Image (cartoon, rainbow, N blue to C red):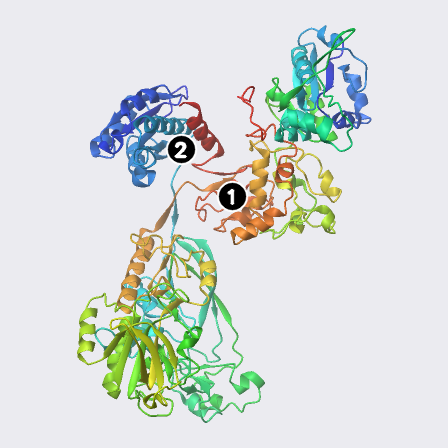
Amino acid sequence: MTAIQGDGSIRIGVFICHCGINIAAKVNISEVVEFAKTLPHVAYATDYQFLCSDPGQELIKTHIRENNLNRIVVASCSPLMHEVTFRRAAGEAGLNPFYVQMANIREQVSWVTKDMKSSTTKAKALVAAAVRRVARHDALEVRQVPVKADVLVVGGGIAGIQAALTIANSDKKVYLVEREPTIGGHMAQFDKTFPTLDCAACILTPKMSSVAVHPNITLLTFSEVVSVEGYTGNFRVRIKRKPRYVIEDKCVGCNACVDACIYKQPRFPDEFNVGLSKRKPVYMPFPQATPSVVLIDPESCIQLKKGTCKMPCVDACDRNAIDFNQKEEFLDVDVGAIILATGYQPFNPSRIPEYGYGKYPNVYTGLEVERLVNAAGPTQGQIVLKDGTKPKSVGIIHCVGSRDQKTNPYCSRVCCMYSLKLAHLIKERTEAEVFNFYIDMRAAGKGYEEFYDRVMSEQVQVIRGRVAEVTDWAVTPEEEGKLVLRVEDTLVGVARRIPVDMVVLSVGLEPQPDVEQVQRLFNISCSKGGWLLERHPKLAPVSTFTDGIFIAGACQGPKDIPDCVAQAGAAAGEAMALIDKGHVDLEPNAAHVRENCSGCRTCISACPFHAISLDKETGLSVVNEALCKGCGTCVASCPSGVAQQQMFTDEQIYEEIEGIMNYV
Amino acid sequence: MSKPKIGFYWCASCGGCDEAVVDLAENILSVVEAVDIAVWPVAMDFKRSDVENMQDGEMVVTFINGAIRNTEDREIVEILREKSKYIVAFGSCAHLGGVPGMGNLYTRESILECSYSETPSVVNPEKVCPQGETTVPEGVLTLPVLEERVWTLDQTIEVDYYLPGCPPPVALIVDGVTAFLTNQLPPKGSVLGPKHSLCLDCPRKDTKPENMLIKEFKRPHETEIDLETCLLAQGLLCLGPATRSGCGAACINGNMPCTGCLGPTDSVRDYGAKALSGIASLFDAETEADIARIADRIVDPAGTFYRYSLPGSLFQGKVFQKEGARS
């Protein structure tokens, strides 16, 4: 490392980049170079066509050595663009990389200032600011912290399953946490999947079984994350295991207890069939539930509610798996990375009362019809109306709770395709006449347009128009006893009334109702509407602003199964990259609390990353450097000025301001 | 050998700083024993010529309180600077401008206008206003003239040390005087007081929540103030977090919030801005409307956060002056 001159003097080199004509056309470069030479501590100043090029970097390195420079200023583009480049060059010349300061005379000057005279003046001011600032820079070290080798995946839908399996297959340990009693998520409830019409269960359940038996996966169903501490590479997560009143290790899923239950008939709404069928208080969520373990619902079990049941289930279980005294338990795990795959909730169509959901028995949601179509569903795959008869005509309304300023402005991306799929399945099972009411037919995906063509060839009717109302008010004899869809057919330009027996609402996707809690728990941001926010929509789609926490699947925004699976793979890859590296580099822009803190605690409530705490012994604030993101909030808030941020000390910023004010 | 000479002087001041010297009580005897008080207009009779006739540097130290408000203040402190080896800015007004410094929110003319004609209790039909020179049959009378704005002492003359506070706490005065008498002086430019802010010494610090947010500010007369709980936690605008300690939490012990008279710690250049920033960080606000609602409860923000320090702040006042700004 180039030592500061024997006399401790600061020798600054200033390098002005032309960026071809990007800068040179608008800034008088030689004037800026001559000006730079007059600034305090500047030992050398020059310009070059492209400083970011190899010869440009070489030029910087040569002058650092030849002129014994111990600080450099590069006046070129934005630091986001090339700070890494110039820091590396300085490092290669033996300088601490943090003795580099950039003056952005492209984005902030030549690209935005028309007049050459004023842009030259502005460039000089920014160079002066950088020179004054860099003189106050400190030599800083990037700190490395080892990472924990295990990964936590939150959410056991298809995205979580895929991420967990990918990571586990690379011989890393995964904790998969699912709050429902079984993994599988929404995909397990679907009948067929578009556009290939694969049976959802046929492609999903093998993956679910793999999860259950994988030696590297610890599956924690009926469990929720209650707290997350730590930072990238080093999270400590507390998981609450809710009582199922069945000992998971003992139950083999034989269902003897279910058969023996004091309730001879199922009486309670079955969650898996979205309330279209009934279950008993002790139940298996669905035949392929994973783990294959029953659970007891404390809301409906007589023993758990009143303690007065004869408990035939206990007698029936020859493995003594039933335990009415089970309590919730907590488990702490240490992981290096976390993948959130917390999914979505279907839009609740009672929010659009004109569609009559909940009012007319034969208005269904898409998910309800998925269950009706399914052979394992409440009607064994028969599509029947509430009175048991087959519908002769069905209307499918697209964009329910999507592309609608009153509910959700966004497109839910999957509804066009699943509407077409349901149209196909309904047609296939019932031979009913099927009408699809759409705004735009969105079939952008591999094989999707072809699927649309196929369904069109099956004589499914499509009417372009947003349905205004679903009503049972008949105005003609043919409409008697029917549900009438009132719609403007925008292709024909007429208002129409279409009477049908059954209405299917293709509901959109919405963020989970408790997304805010997830956001707080994992300290991540949400985009508008509550979808978890990715770090960059194009270049970091599965990363978040909290390092070490990744997102996959519909929790990030509406998406179909192929996209969820692809994202899950990407998130798994990111998590493995972090873990395989073995350590994390911490930017040295962390804040620290200097001496003379008075323990006023202002910074503690101000810190958005919970990186500051009160030292129990001294009563003063301490920054956990690993948690600190270098946002500077504590520095601004510290009333006694002792919280300071490396790379952004008060002195450095005052010097920068004075540099801007005092020279031009 | 004669005893070392020291001086006390007052400029734009309320007299409280001199009172604080008297408050030394029996300690003052040991001071008087050790030194000769060569100048102390509030307590003894001295003429300007007595000072002018001194040798340069004849006095070891002069403690000057009050802000620089008029030409007389400026003239005398310039003389005292020559005659004293050390100058100590004594109290908030000399240190940072103090309460008189709030005058920098107004022009000199509007202050005179207000004092000599607009104030309801003033009867002045002829609009007589103080003049620097008035010609009478006997000759020309002169009066000191108000400066354009209020200055801190170090904006006027070179200052060696600062004793903060309104007035400086007795303990700090004793320590400061002792430092001179024993010649154990800190680096030039130091503020003679603790380096940390008041919270560290606050008797109520243990009652301050670790994660404190404020939903609503209350003024002392609007609420029954608990005697033991952190005042900020009770919604009172206490500036203790931003204010240099050294007062022994006098106001807090009187169940009143700190108003910031000892000024900022060594790490802060602009007391008001920092205090404001610190307090604003505690707003429990989700929306801009929340922020506005909470902020609206802070009556007179300039007077709250810059009560003692406006002339010494980065902006120095509402009315900008071209000449004489601190370089």
Within 10 Å of disc 1 (Cα), the crowding (few <14, some 14-19, many 20+) is many
Labels in figure, total: 2
Residue name at image x 23 percent, y 77 percent: A197
Q: Dot 2: what SS?
A: loop
Chain for disc number 2: A
Which label was assigned to residue A396? Answer: none
- What residue would you read off at disc 2? A139
Foreground residue, B250 or B97? B97
Q: Where's the C terminus of chain A, which quadrant?
A: top left
Q: Report the front residue among B99 and A167.
A: B99
Residue A199 seen from this side: no
Give yes or no for contact between labels 2 and 1 (Cβ–Cβ under 8 Å): no
Query: In which quadrant of the rendered view does residue A190 lie?
Result: bottom left
User: Label 2 sits on what residue type?
Assistant: Ala
Residue A403 occupies quadrant? bottom left
The amino acid marked with disc number 1 is Cys
Residue A608's x, y, as percent?
49, 50
The Cα–Cα distance between marks 2 and 1, rounded to whole angstroms, is: 22 Å
Image mark for residue A634: 1
Relative image position of residue A185 (x, y in whole percent)? 36, 73
Q: In which quarter of the image is residue B258?
A: top right
Q: Can residue A259 be seen in this view?
A: yes
Task: Check the image and report above or below for A210 versus B176.
Answer: below
Q: Do labels 2 and 1 share a chain?
A: yes
Seen in the picture, residue A12 relative to B220 is either above or below; the reply is above
Dot 1: what SS? helix
| Camera-nearest label, 2 or 1 | 1
The earlier-in-sequence mark between 2 and 1 is 2
Q: Where is residue A567 in the image (x, y as percent from the top left)?
A: 29, 62
